[in-house]
Image (cartoon, coloured by chain):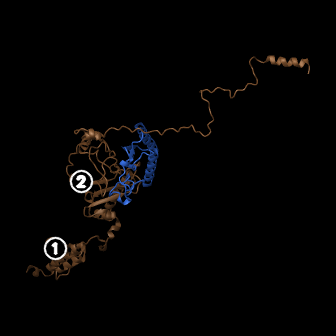
């Protein structure tokens, strides 16, 4: 959703959900770097398919990655990419990864406002 | 050149195998084309046709699952655990997002709904299921611990530690090493001197209002070590309070933590006044008892309160009443 950063928690939500940036949170820097790595990996692996921001939620050691993709490639390829992403990322980050995708027919279905 | 040389050359030719032609030409314009067409050298590649771009055939997708859900289904089977919102699975007409001019966007293709954490896996029936599954691991509440007072009597000391859960791969938190121990001072077997000494030793760790002694240990790296250290400190404090050192006899009136009327000149003045005109010695003052003397008791109480609690309207008024009763008894009675 479009909006300057100060509208977060007022009219839109965060893209990363974790406890690291709370008071006395642990590993804030490592988590930020990991999130950025996951985002870049997703944008590259699902090239030209992601229609929204990549949402990263962490619960204990599980990382759940959510995004909206476009129905542009065959279902078989989507299944392969899901398995590939989960496997490779969990190997790199050494924790269980879950990919929770939603698909839309057209990229314009996600557009909320043209700036 | 003679006849002999001519003969030798001939011999050589004869030795060659039949059909061998030393001057045969392999590449020649006379070669027959294999595909039947005459091949032309195509330098500018005019005959190259680029591959047509592969056209994507639209994937046939099923209609949303929410449309075919029975009304009496078990929702905890549909949504068993924490999961990001999915519009095709949730049969609710949700909208999320802020738009000052139009209505909020619907649930399909809405990233805002995916961002916000949902509790669709924690519906009341699901919680009930969890509880009934966990019930077999529960034990009965021990007998004799029905009320809080019973618990306090049987377990006077409380140990507080905290475990932290983070949304990160580490399970270690430096704060979890801190151990807090709480104990009521009245549950310890302390006499008047030992109690006073204990309060002086622990300083502001003792809360006068709740009579609670709190010891927080965080200097060791692990919780176990901190707990052991806390127990050690408590034991050391207890035994140190119960010992009476020789130098403690040197405690003077100025070192007293609160005002004791019997040790002070106020009692001497009172005794001198009540026994007027005879002269009183220090021994007389010490042995003088005010157990049957209500005026004396009131005066003692008023002076003690005034000096221990500080001057305010209430204590000053009380002191005035008591002083008048001592000095002018007839005025008060009249």
Going from the N terminus, do you reach mark 1 or mark 2 first?
A: 2
Is B229 placed above or below B318 here?
A: above
- SS for dot 1: helix
Dot 2 surroundings within 10 Å: few (below 14), some, or many (20 or more)? some
Which residue position holds label 2?
B152
Q: Depth check: give the residue in front, B239 or A72.
A: A72
Left or right, residue B183 beside residue B30: left
Spatial CA distance of label 1 from label 2 is: 37 Å
Which residue position holds label 1?
B298
Residue B179 point in image, percent of width and height = 35, 55
Q: Which chain is brown?
A: B
- SS for dot 2: helix
Q: Residue B32: tell me if it is visible.
A: yes
Q: Nearer the viewer, mark 1 or mark 2?
A: 2
Q: Are marks 1 and 2 in contact (CB under 8 Å)?
A: no
Indicate the quadrant containing the C terminus of chain A: top left, top right, bottom left or bottom right.
bottom left
Tint applied to chain A in the drawing:
blue
Chain letter, disc 2 residue = B
Q: Residue A64: tell me if it is visible.
A: no
């Amino acid at each position: 959703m479009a909006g300057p950063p100060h509208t977060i928690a007022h009219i839109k939500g965060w893209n990363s959900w974790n406890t690291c940036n709370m008071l006395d949170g642990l590993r804030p820097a490592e988590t930020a770097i990991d999130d950025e790595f996951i985002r870049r990996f997703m944008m590259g692996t699902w090239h030209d398919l992601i229609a929204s921001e990549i949402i990263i939620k962490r619960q204990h050691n599980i990382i759940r990655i959510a995004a909206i993709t476009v129905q542009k490639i065959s279902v078989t390829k989507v299944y392969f990419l899901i398995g590939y992403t989960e496997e490779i990322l969990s190997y790199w980050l050494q924790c269980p990864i879950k990919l929770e995708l939603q698909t839309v027919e057209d990229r314009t279905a996600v557009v909320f406002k043209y700036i | 050149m003679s006849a002999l040389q001519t003969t030798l050359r001939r011999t050589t030719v004869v030795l060659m195998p039949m059909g061998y032609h030393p001057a045969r030409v392999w590449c020649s314009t006379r070669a027959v084309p294999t595909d039947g067409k005459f091949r032309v050298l195509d330098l500018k590649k005019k005959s190259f046709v680029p591959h047509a771009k592969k056209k994507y055939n639209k994937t046939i997708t099923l209609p949303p699952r929410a449309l075919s859900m029975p009304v009496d289904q078990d929702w905890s089977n549909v949504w068993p655990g924490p999961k990001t919102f999915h519009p095709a699975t949730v049969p609710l007409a949700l909208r999320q997002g802020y738009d000052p001019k139009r209505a909020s966007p619907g649930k399909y293709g809405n990233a805002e709904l995916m961002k916000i954490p949902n509790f669709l896996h924690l519906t009341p029936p699901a919680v009930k299921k969890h509880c009934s599954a966990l019930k077999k691991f529960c034990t009965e509440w021990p007998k004799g611990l029905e009320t809080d007072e019973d618990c306090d009597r049987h377990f006077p000391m409380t140990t507080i530690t905290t475990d932290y859960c983070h949304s990160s791969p580490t399970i270690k938190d430096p704060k979890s090493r801190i151990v807090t121990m709480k104990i009521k001072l009245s549950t310890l077997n302390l006499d008047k001197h030992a109690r006073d000494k204990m309060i002086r030793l622990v300083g502001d760790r003792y809360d006068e209002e709740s009579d609670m002694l709190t010891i927080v240990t965080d200097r060791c790296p692990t919780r176990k070590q901190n707990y052991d250290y806390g127990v050690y400190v408590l034991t050391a404090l207890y035994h140190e309070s119960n010992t009476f050192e020789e130098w403690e006899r040197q405690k003077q009136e100025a070192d007293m933590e609160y005002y004791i009327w019997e040790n002070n000149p106020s009692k001497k003045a009172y005794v001198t006044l009540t026994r007027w005109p005879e002269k009183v010695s220090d021994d007389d003052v010490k042995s003088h008892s005010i157990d049957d003397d209500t005026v004396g008791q009131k005066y003692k109480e008023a002076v003690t309160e005034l000096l221990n609690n500080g001057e305010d309207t209430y204590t000053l008024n009380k002191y005035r009443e008591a002083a008048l009763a001592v000095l002018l008894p007839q005025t008060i009675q009249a």
